[in-house]
Amino acid sequence: MERDINAALGDRLFRLLVIKALDIDSLSDMKVASLSGGEMQRLSIVLCLGTPARVYLIDEPSAGLDCEQRIIAAKVMKRWVVNHLGRTAFIVEHDFVMAAAMADKVVVYEGKPGVDCVARSPCSVGDGFNRFLKNLNVTFRRDPINFRPRINKKGSRKDRLQKKAGEYYLFDDDDDEDDDDL
């Protein structure tokens, strides 16, 4: 594994697309034991992506990362694994923003976790998000300025319209009027 990581560290494209994007060079003088949770997570992502694999399994890559770092990490993982290496990644992620930024398909679990749970077939991000949110009876839209998900107030005009249309998660919201966000 050490040889694989060293090879990746010497790869100019890996340094540009992964190390530079995740700002790992800023950690070079620090001891691993002194890294914060977010710094450790970014380093873990680099170690994972720097190890050659046919399939990457990544659990909760957003843990410890702030909003901006989550988006950067999502783009880095997708760009490196899918676009550059042409590989597949199975990523367990509960952060909607991060999942939307990197997923091609999602698997929705329904039921009571650890008791009676069913994994649905892989589906598009939109269909998966809509199925999940319908089960929760919650609607989301994207903020027109920062594109982050915003919860619609239960029973509001947008909430009712989206539910009627079966669109529990609006990916492209042309109507930028405020809707009494929670």
Image: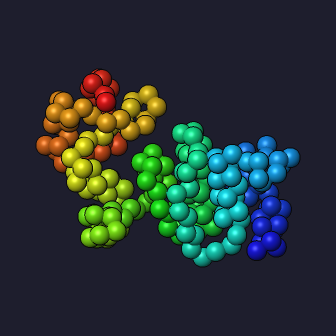
Tell me what residue is drawn at x 32 percent, y 53 percent.
129
The answer to whether 151 is drawn above or below residue 177 in the figure is below
| Residue found at the far left of this picture | 164
Left or right: 180 in relation to 150:
left
Image quadrant containing the N terminus = bottom right
**Exactly how many numbered labels are in the figure?**
0
| Residue found at the far right of this picture | 29
- Residue 152: % across, % down: 27, 34
Tell me what residue is drawn at x 55 percent, y 51 percent.
63
- Figure quadrant of residue 178: top left
Query: Of 91 and 88, which appears nearest the observer?
Result: 91
- Figure quadrant of residue 10: bottom right
The answer to whether 67 is drawn above or below residue 63 in the figure is above
- Residue 36: % across, % down: 69, 45
The answer to whether 158 is drawn above or below residue 8 in the figure is above
- Residue 103: % across, % down: 45, 57
Residue 144 in view here: yes
- Residue 136: % across, % down: 24, 50
Residue 20 in view here: no
Left or right: 110 in relation to 157:
right
Tell me what residue is drawn at x 31 percent, y 30 percent.
182
Tell me what residue is drawn at x 53 percent, y 62 percent.
59
Q: How is the image coloured?
A: rainbow
- Figure quadrant of residue 173: top left
Query: Of 37 and 119, which appears nearest the observer?
Result: 37
Left or right: 159 in relation to 124:
left
